[in-house]
Amino acid sequence: MQAMLRHLLHLTWLETKIFVREPLGVFGSVAVPVLLFLVVGRIAIGSTDAQAIREAAPGDVEFLRTDLPVFVAILITLSAVLSLVTIIAIYREGGILKRLRATPVRPPTILLAHVLVKLLFTAATLGLMVAVGRRFYPIGFDAPLAAFTVALAFSTWSLLSIGFVIASVVPTARFAQPLGALLLYPMIPLSGLFTPIEMLPPGLEMVARYLPLTYAVSLLRGIWSGNGWSAHLGDVAVLGLVFLLATAVASKTFRWE
């Protein structure tokens, strides 16, 4: 057990250093969501003056207070999933996974290290978003951040399991990110983030209720707004079920070479 934990920590640190050495990857995963949060918020208010933000209309303040942070949190999660899909595909195509599998380190430890790296950068990006929000949007950033961080980590953990399924079927690294984006980003407009699910056409409403992102949005929005976890047990159960099912599928289809 101690050896496995030591290997896990070592691999996590190693993968973190490898990720940081790729400036574009760090910029896309960390900086882009934070910049989007800042730019979209300023556009919504229509001014770059902090006093104007303080005096904004209630609807604009509500957008900044709830919808925009949840939207950016979803982008942080999807960015982590796409990054995982791309890295796994690159490692497989380059023979790195095959060589890692031949080491004494157990395969689940190798994959778990990748997941932990994504969760660490997810938490770091969320921290930057909150810091930016408190600096540029002085509108009472009083969300329960500890509970929201747990909700975001849980949602990311669930969706990362889907990333392993995508990575299992991607033929080459060149197609990993485009295919992942094609499968994941269309979920956003159907997730209830911008339009309530009940207002969607019947066919799209049915599709939306089968999308894991719908339940991630519901959980994140509720926790950010101050709801207790007991109000979102259904969301937690669905995301947990998604994790179990996707993990089972990935364990059957995952290719190391």
Image (cartoon, rainbow, N blue to C red):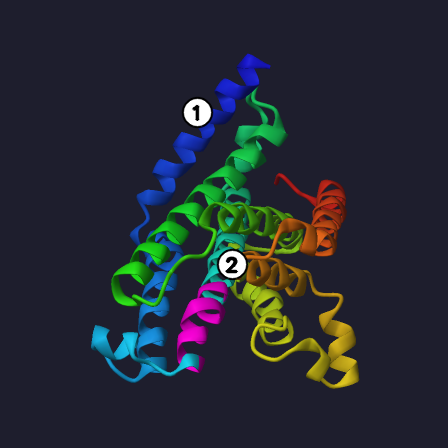
Residue 42 sits in quarter? bottom left
Tally the numbered discs.
2
Image spot of residue 137 (x, y percent): 31, 67
Q: Is residue 101 left or right of residue 22?
A: right
Magenta run includes residue 66: yes
Stretch of the chain drawn in magenta: 59-70
- Mark 2 highlights which residue? 224
Q: Judge by depth and name the residue closer to the eye, 151 or 155.
A: 151
Residue 28 lies, in percent from the top left, at 37, 59
Where residue 63 is drawn, which disc sits there? none
The spot of residue 136 in percent (x, y) is 26, 66
Who comes first in sequence, dot 1 or dot 2? 1
Q: Is residue 95 visible to us here?
A: no
At a point 61% along the width and 40% down the height, the residue shown is 257
> Can you tell which quarter of the image residue 207 is in?
bottom right
Q: Residue at x 59, y 60 (%)?
A: 222
Q: Is disc 1 placed on a helix, strand or loop?
A: helix
Disc 1 and disc 2: Cα gap in Å?
A: 34 Å
Can you say whether 116 is above or below 192 in the image?
Answer: above
Can you see residue 122? Answer: yes
Q: Looking at the image, which residue sits at the far top?
A: 2
Asked if residue 253 lies left or right of residue 221, the reply is right
Q: Nearer the viewer, residue 160 or 108?
A: 160
Quadrant location, the N terminus: top right
Q: Residue at x 54, y 14 (%)?
A: 3
